[in-house]
Every structure is written in C-alpha cells, then in structure tokens.
C-alpha cells in the first residue's frame, strides 16, 4: 500500500512539472532590441546608424571648406563722419566750446570778463601760450566795451581758432610703401588710451576708403589685445597676424609685413603694447620693433594715440614717445564726453606734427579724419 502512494505521488509531481513547462513555453519571447540600442558601442563601427546620421549633417559652409562664412560690416564712409559727430563737440558737451561762446553771449566784455575767458581757456587745456595769443587777437578785433555784433565776434573767433589749429598741415595718412611694398602704420601709446580699439576703428576707416589691410597683433603681453583685434578685423574681413602670448613683438610685426608683401595688401597696421612713457626698457623695445620692420620696408606712418581726457599730461607722454620713434601724426581718442578739446593746439605745437584722427564716441565708426574747419565750426555751433 505504501508503494502505491509513493508511485502516485511521483506521478502527480511529474504532471505538475510538465504543466508548468508547457505554460512557460507558451509565453512569447520578447522581441530583440534594436542593434544600436542594445549595443551602443556600435556607434563607432562603420555603417552604424549614428555614424550615418553624422555623415548626413551638412557642412558648416560648403563654399569655404567647412569654415563658417565671415559676416562683414560695411563701414561708414570717412568723409561723412565728422559731420555726423560734430554735435559731440558742441558747447553742451565741451568746456572749451563753452568758454569760446561766452564771448558771443556777453553784452559787455570788460577786463574781468577777458580774465575769466583766459582762465577758462587755460583750464580747457589750450595752454598758456595759445590762450594769450587768442585773447590778444580777440581784444584787437572786438570792442573792449562789448560785443556789438555777435556775427562779427563769431567770425573773429573762427578766424583766430583756425589760425591756432592750423589749416596748412598735411593730415592724410601715408600708406604708400616703396617699390610696391605695403605701407606700414605703427601705432603707439601709453596704457589705457584706447590704442587697440583705435586700431580696430582705423581698419574700418581704411576699408571704407577702399584699401586692403592687414593687422599685426604685436601686443604679445596681453592676450586679450590680439583677441580684440581679431574681433575688429573679422567684422570688416581684415586678417590678423598674431604670435604666441609673451612672444617677441618685433617678430610678429616682421612676419605680418612679410605676409603683407606676399599677399599684396595696401597697408599693414601694427599694434604695440601699451607702455608707460617712464619705463625706459619698454620704450627701447618700441624702438626695436621699428628697426626690425625697417629691415624689410620703411615705416610710413607712426601714430601716437593720446587720451584727450588726460589734458596736459598727454603732452608729457608725447615728448618721450617722440624721442624714441619719429611721430608723424596724432590720434586724439575720447575727445567726446569729459575731454576739454583745447589740447588739439598745444599737442601739435609740442610735437610739430598734426592731429590726423579724432575719436568721438564708442561706436565702431566714431573715429573721424580731423578736419580743422569742421572742428572749429562744431565748437562754435550753438
């Protein structure tokens, strides 16, 4: 009997096992995962879906071999800039202009009024000598008892100011090198004058006049200076030659000139590190840059950038730079705003070279060719 139950239990167990096996066998298998999802490592394999998707991407720019096409600005013509910017020299913004117009506004110019005018002009950075000349000439032209005819006073002011500023100097930029080589413009100045920004704006002036330009980022002590030039140049399609940070500035300038000769550009503009005029070692290096450039081609223009807001201190800077490199022209930056404007006269007398460009704002086309008549008319505009 015991054997019977033992056999029966075995049969039941066998049936249960068979039943479970059948039920499990009837469940459908899960579908296999997609190869790319199951094996992400296949993304690197040839012919994978991911690689095919990558190959299907269009190039960044089919016309330039994958490099994004440069978007260039159209600079404002240089001839129209000073007319647009003249309001920034008006009496509402310029202490020099306010002092001049006080003559026209006065009903009577007595000795005290003339003394006040003289003090105002000196404080507006005109300098003692030019101020005495201007006041003496005006007192000869105008009645000491008053300004009977405002228009006559304005004409006298305009005539004397033009005489002080000078109308005979050549204010054009020299950009023609000898024997077909590019002209070379070397730009110098102390720290903080806006020199690199001025070079960027100058490139726009030159492009607007139809010149081909190459920029040399020879301020290797400040990486941001080269990046800044690169940004300015890219806006107008101007290439920038740069070297390693901390590299030899003279070498960068030389390489840029060599490239400019090879590509046939009209002018190479060389940025230099801002340097304190009291640091003799840095000033000597500036002389070295000029000498190295002139092994290959003459420097046709040396522009000194002076911050017009520094007033008479700018004259001290100018004297030292003139001893190291032959300054041929002056750029007065930041002439709008708090600048007093009178510095135009003494800085020209100090160096014996003309102001060629003036900066009158922060916009990309706010650098203008200096025109004495337009400058004086802007000062006298009400």
Image (cartoon, rainbow, N blue to C red):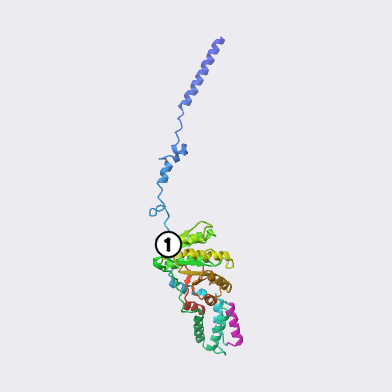
Please state which of residues 50 and 348 is positioned toward the viewer in this rendering: 348
For label 1, count other residues whose C-alpha is less than 10 Å away and answer few (under 14), some (14-19) or many (20+): many
**Residue 382 visible to the viewer:** no
Q: Which residue is painted at 50% across and 61% down in the image?
A: 250
State the SS at label 1.
helix
Q: Does residue 321 belong to the magenta stretch?
A: no
Q: Main secondary structure of the magenta part?
A: helix
Residue depicted at 42% across the width and 43% down the height: 51
115 falls in the magenta region: yes
In the rendered image, the vertical position of residue 52 relative to residue 15, given as above or below = below
Picture coordinates of residue 348 (x, y %)?
52, 76
Residue at the outermost right position: 112
Q: Position of residue 167 (x, y in %)?
A: 47, 79
Splitting the image into 4 quarters, where does residue 184 fall? bottom left
Front residue of this view, candidates 204 and 196: 196
* Quarter of the figure with the N terminus: top right
Give the magenta part as a residue range: 109-123
Q: Residue furthest left?
A: 63
Residue position marked by numbered label 1 in the rendering = 260
Residue at (50% x, 67% y) in the render:
187
Nearer the observer, 3 or 131: 131
On screen, residue 255 above or below 46? below
Q: Which residue is pictured at 57% across the width and 83% down the height?
A: 132
Q: Position of residue 35 (x, y in %)?
A: 44, 37
Q: Position of residue 271 (x, y in %)?
A: 50, 64
Specify whether residue 292 is in view: yes
On screen, 113 above or below 335?
below
């Amino acid at each position: 009997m015991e054997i019977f139950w033992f056999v029966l239990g075995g049969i039941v167990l066998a049936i249960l096992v068979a039943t479970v096996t059948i039920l499990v066998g009837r469940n459908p298998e899960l579908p296999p995962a997609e190869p790319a999802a199951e094996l992400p490592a296949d993304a690197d394999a040839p012919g994978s879906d991911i690689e095919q998707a990558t190959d299907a991407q269009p190039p960044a720019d089919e016309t330039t071999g994958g490099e994004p096409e440069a978007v260039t600005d159209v600079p404002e013509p240089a001839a129209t800039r000073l007319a647009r910017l003249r309001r920034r020299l008006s009496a509402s913004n310029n202490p020099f202009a306010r002092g001049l117009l006080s003559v026209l506004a006065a009903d009577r110019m007595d000795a005290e009024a003339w003394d006040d005018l003289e003090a105002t002009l000196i404080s507006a950075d005109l300098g003692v000598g030019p101020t005495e000349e201007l006041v003496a000439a005006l007192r000869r032209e105008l009645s000491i008892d008053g300004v009977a005819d405002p228009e006559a006073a304005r004409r006298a002011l305009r005539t004397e100011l033009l005489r002080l500023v000078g109308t005979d100097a050549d204010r054009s930029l020299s950009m023609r090198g000898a024997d077909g080589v590019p002209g070379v413009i070397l730009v110098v100045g102390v720290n903080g004058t806006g020199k690199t920004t001025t070079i960027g704006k100058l490139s726009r002036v030159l492009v607007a006049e139809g010149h081909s330009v190459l920029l040399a980022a020879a301020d290797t002590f400040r990486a941001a200076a080269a990046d800044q030039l690169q940004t300015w140049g890219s806006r107008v399609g101007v290439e920038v030659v740069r070297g390693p940070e901390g590299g030899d500035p003279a070498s960068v300038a030389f390489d840029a000139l060599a490239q400019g000769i090879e590509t046939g550009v009209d002018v190479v503009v060389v940025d230099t590190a801002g340097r304190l005029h009291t640091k003799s070692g840095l000033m000597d290096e500036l002389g070295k840059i000029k000498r190295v450039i002139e092994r290959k081609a003459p420097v046709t223009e040396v522009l000194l950038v002076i911050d017009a807001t520094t007033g008479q201190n700018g004259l001290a800077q100018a004297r030292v730079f003139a001893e190291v490199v032959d300054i041929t022209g002056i750029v007065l930056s930041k002439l709008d705003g708090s600048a007093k404007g009178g510095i135009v006269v003494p800085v020209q007398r100090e160096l014996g070279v003309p102001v060629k460009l003036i900066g009158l704002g922060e916009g990309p086309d706010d650098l203008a060719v200096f025109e004495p008549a337009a400058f004086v008319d802007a000062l006298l505009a009400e």
